[in-house]
Image: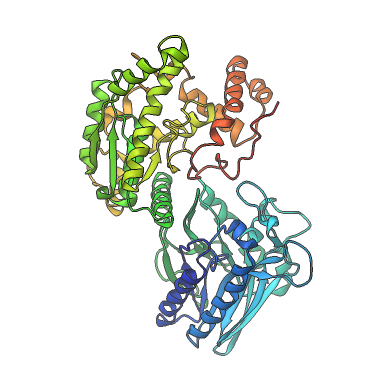
């Protein structure tokens, strides 16, 4: 039996369009000799559909799309499609996260997801009921009947102890003596997450004594980016096939083959995975929200430089505008660095000095302030002037304004509301400052050349530039300003932030392990105090274990 793995990039809520994507993959698969096409979790909806699932009209429309898909599907091909199955009887939630088998002009539900995640970015118990029984699908092919164990995403993760211990979807399949385990997923990207998925699948393969097919969604949906990276393992947990990272893909696998037909591609370098995922996130956010162009403020600092590189790779340099907005405090080096970067990337660049606007504010505010603006007030005015200019360009040209702040700044509030926080998407809002430096060093190194070529970036020589990568971080809002004037060194700050944000460590635990008590108290205080800013921030592409977004639900007013 030849299986086709369709690693699709759906548009959330586009039932008709997603149905056409599945159908196109079905025709491609059939032409290649496949007998069964697999598509990801909720492939007809795109994941996560969130409250679109609460609209009865869309549930009815799903049924019509499924009927049309069944009518148009190749007669000798079976499809597994991710659907929201209406539950019988009263009560809420009224749906199952399910798989439908489409074949011979009809369709039926054949699997219901049993473990419904409600942690981090997931909230499936708001919409779905858990399935009750293990799903085994029998498909006749040639002179053999294949027994396929069906699971959906989280059903595989119970092995790591993240699901309720009383429900073990993999263990429940052991007695059924299946020939293959299929896991159809929509699993967002996370650093090192690919290794976790493969480890879970390998354990399942050994427990079941059967190969495992893991098929993942790909594409950016709001702040979540799905990296694909689907794979097939044999019954001993060894890789037989690996699909592309951060790109749509369709691959065939012969279930009767004893081993890999060719050498299995290695996983990309972790830095390459991160860059590709960020590029995909920007490209899909823009396309799915209807933007063709993007713009950003280019300061000559490392954050805006990295966002410019990602935007150029995502949309093409001809679709990216950068605005340089020097103040009297901007260094000549920063202005030159920004100009050189724009030239290397081929970006359209414009310079608007903000000194006249600063002078106008300084002349207008004294009656209300009792004097000219000073200190933080003066610094924030510069940031808000720049934010206003950027929004004016975005409005005039219909472009997507990209925010350039990083996670370290957003965590401690080292950013300005209605200033540098302006934008529709925070591209690196889930990258700590030390990660920004690490990624930029990799981009400028020789190992990145193949990836840069694939992304349409200049393949050789420095792209970010040593001058940008090595200069001390500074907002340049006052003479000789450095980030270190207001914050601990990022090499010290970022581990503390990661412990507090992602590992949920307490300040007391960190102090007991040797951290400076005054520093920990200060960082924890800054983290709590900046919550009101984060609530108003642009969505940030999630790449870490815990990002500021739908998986971060802290109160603003709390003690």
Q: Quadrant of residue 169?
A: bottom right
Residue 492 point in image, percent of width and height: 50, 23
Residue 240 point in image, percent of width and height: 48, 66
Q: Nearer the viewer, residue 156 or 54?
A: 54
Q: Nearer the viewer, residue 266 or 88?
A: 88
Q: Is residue 127 above or below residue 546?
A: below
Q: Quadrant of residue 546?
A: top right
Q: Nearer the viewer, residue 53 or 405?
A: 53
Say left or right for 547 vs 244.
Answer: right
**Whether residue 54 is visible:** yes
Residue 447 point in image, percent of width and height: 31, 44
Q: Nearer the viewer, residue 248 or 411?
A: 411
The residue shown at (42%, 40%) is: 423
Q: Is residue 101 above or below residue 418?
A: below
Say left or right for 298 vs 184.
Answer: left
Q: Residue furthest front?
A: 367
Residue 411 point in image, percent of width and height: 53, 30
The residue shown at (61%, 22%) is: 525
How many labels, in total?
0
The residue shown at (50%, 37%) is: 537
**Whether residue 477 is visible:** no
Q: Residue furthest bottom?
A: 143
Q: Looking at the rendering, in which quadrant would you find the C terminus?
A: top right
Which coloring applies here?
rainbow
Q: Is residue 7 above or below residue 509?
A: below
Q: Is residue 280 above or below residue 151?
A: above
């Amino acid at each position: 039996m030849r299986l086709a793995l369709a690693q699709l990039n759906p548009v959330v809520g586009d039932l008709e369009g997603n149905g056409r994507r599945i159908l196109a993959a079905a025709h491609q698969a059939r032409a290649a000799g496949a007998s069964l096409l697999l598509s990801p979790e909720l492939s007809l909806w795109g994941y996560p559909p969130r409250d679109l699932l609460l609209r009865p009209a869309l549930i009815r429309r799903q049924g019509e799309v499924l009927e049309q898909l069944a009518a148009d599907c190749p007669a000798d091909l079976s499809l597994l499609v991710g659907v929201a199955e209406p539950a019988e009887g009263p009560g809420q939630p009224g749906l199952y996260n399910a798989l439908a088998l489409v074949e011979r002009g009809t369709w039926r539900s054949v699997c219901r997801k049993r473990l419904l995640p409600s942690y981090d970015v997931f909230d499936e118990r708001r919409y779905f009921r858990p399935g009750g029984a293990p799903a085994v699908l029998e498909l006749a092919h040639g002179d053999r009947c294949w027994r396929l164990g069906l699971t959906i995403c989280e059903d595989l993760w119970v092995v790591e102890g993240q699901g309720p211990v009383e429900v073990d979807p993999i263990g429940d399949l052991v007695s059924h003596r299946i020939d293959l385990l299929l896991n159809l997923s929509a699993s967002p990207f996370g650093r090192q997450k690919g290794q976790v998925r493969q480890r879970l699948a390998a354990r399942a393969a050994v427990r079941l004594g059967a190969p495992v097919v893991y098929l993942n969604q790909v594409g950016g949906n709001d702040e979540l980016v799905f990296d694909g990276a689907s794979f097939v393992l044999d019954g001993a947990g060894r890789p037989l096939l690996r699909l592309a990272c951060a790109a749509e893909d369709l691959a065939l696998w012969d279930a009767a083959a004893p081993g890999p037909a060719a050498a299995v591609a290695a996983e990309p370098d972790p830095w390459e995975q991160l860059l590709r995922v960020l590029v995909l996130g920007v490209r899909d956010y823009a396309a799915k929200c209807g933007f063709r162009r993007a713009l950003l403020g280019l300061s000559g600092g490392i954050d805006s430089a990295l966002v410019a590189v990602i935007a150029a790779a995502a949309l093409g340099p001809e679709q990216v505008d950068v605005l340089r907005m020097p103040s009297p405090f901007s260094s000549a080096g920063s202005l030159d660095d920004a100009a050189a970067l724009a030239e290397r990337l081929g970006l359209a660049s414009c310079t608007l000095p903000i000194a006249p606007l600063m002078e106008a504010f300084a002349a207008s505010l004294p009656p209300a302030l009792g004097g000219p603006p000073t200190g933080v007030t003066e610094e924030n005015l510069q940031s808000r002037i720049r934010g206003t200019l950027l929004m004016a360009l975005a409005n005039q040209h219909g472009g997507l304004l990209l925010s350039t702040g990083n996670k370290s700044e957003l965590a401690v509030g080292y950013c300005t509301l209605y200033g540098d926080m302006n934008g529709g998407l925070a591209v690196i809002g889930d990258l700590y400052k030390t990660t920004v430096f690490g990624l930029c060093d990799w981009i400028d190194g020789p190992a990145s050349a193949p990836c840069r070529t694939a992304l349409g970036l200049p393949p050789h020589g420095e792209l970010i530039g040593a001058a940008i990568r090595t200069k001390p971080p500074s907002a340049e809002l006052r003479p000789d300003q450095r980030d270190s004037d207001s914050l601990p060194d990022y090499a010290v700050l970022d581990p503390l932030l990661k412990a507090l944000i992602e590992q949920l460590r307490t300040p007391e635990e960190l102090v007991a392990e040797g951290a400076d008590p005054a520093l920990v108290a200060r960082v924890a205080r800054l983290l709590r105090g900046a919550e009101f800013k984060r609530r108003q921030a642009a969505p940030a592409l999630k790449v870490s274990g815990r990002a500021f977004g739908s998986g971060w639900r802290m109160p603003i007013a709390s003690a």
